[in-house]
Amino acid sequence: MSINIIFFIIRRIINAFVTLLLLIIIVFIMIHVIAPNPLALARLYTGPHATYSELEQVAKEYGLDKPLYVQIVNYIINVLHGNFGIDPVYKVPVIDLIGKYLPRTLELVIPATILSVIIGLVTGAIAASNRNNPIDYLVRGVYLVTWASPPFFVATILQLVIAYYLRLLPPTGTVNPTLSPPKSITPFPLVNAMITGNWPYFFSLLHHMILPTVAIALVTFGIITRIARASMLDYMESDFARLSFMKGLSRRRVVYGVVLRNASIPLVTLIALLFGYSVAGAVVIEDVFQYHGMGYFITQAIEGLDYTSILGTTLIVGISIIIANLIADILYGILDPRVRIIE
């Protein structure tokens, strides 16, 4: 690893830390704009029947009565020590709740991102190889409709058609509630079911994952299709593509074996952004399918003004997106030798 890459990673880590600090400050301010009275936040810890003196005591105990800047500094110090606070609703550490819900969302977002990239690359290649033909117009029309549609709309259509009308897949839920969960070996229920051989639970999880995974992929693949098509059209006119045709290679091999491979390099950074967009889309889609993942947890926290969980989940999602972008930048420099990371 060159010294330039090392300095680049250090700079990105510093930028990431500053970004997370700004994220915490912005979310803190937004929460206190919504609920400026510390007693309103204290009521989350005490319940609706607490007396005024009890509310004051709880506000003092958790530092809710302190100035906003003091609360922000204290929270940042606690986060650096791995303490995301105690959730006032569930009465457990927020990090434990994140550890429960985040793996479920990753089990949706990771395959959805992979599926989205595959669909986007294939449709982009088909559109580029059939430029200005009916197939090209069809592909562009489909991806524009899905890309422009709100995530909840796509999820609802899939739910109505596939689940309720055709009855092919379950409309809601994470798993059949009558099944016994496997032993917790890893944070991922799907992996635990596979390791322990609990196949009924495993296939039930897969059965419930299909619709939300497809919904996430449908609302995200359009950007891959558009960029892949534009990139491939540029590479189709390049010297190496013309040389491949002159060597006698078939059009299919040139398009899918030569041009598509080179056109995929600029999409590396975009895939990281796509991952972040998929996480954001999962917030709404999980709520539609009542899939108890990170999106469902965030929705419940926002509706209940559960500010400790809002802060914790926002921070975790921010860290995930920043790491994904860092990996994408490094991979971009590795995959394309023409790219050099400069000071």
Image: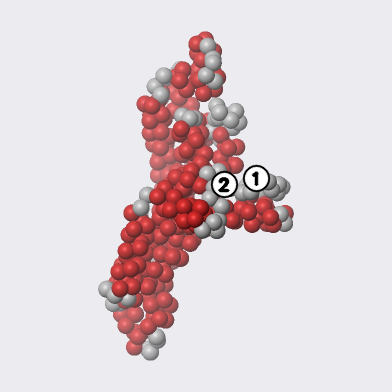
Q: Position of residue 324 (x, y in %)?
A: 46, 52
Q: Residue flagged by tag 2: what amino acid is it? A: Gly
Look at mark 2 in the image and give the residue it sits on: 173
What residue sits 47% from the left and 45% below the top?
A: 288
Residue at position x 44%, y 50% in the image = 156
Q: Can residue 103 be seen in the rendering of this structure?
A: no
Tag 2 secondary structure: loop
Name the residue that disc number 1 marks: 177
Where is residue 292, by image quadrant?
Answer: top right
* 2 w.r.t. 179: above or below: below
- Which quadrant of the figure has residue 89? top right
Q: Is residue 241 above or below residue 225?
A: below
Near-viewer residue (84 or 162): 162
Residue 123 shows up from this direction:
yes
Circle 1: residue type: Pro
In the displayed structure, 146 sits above or below 235; it is above
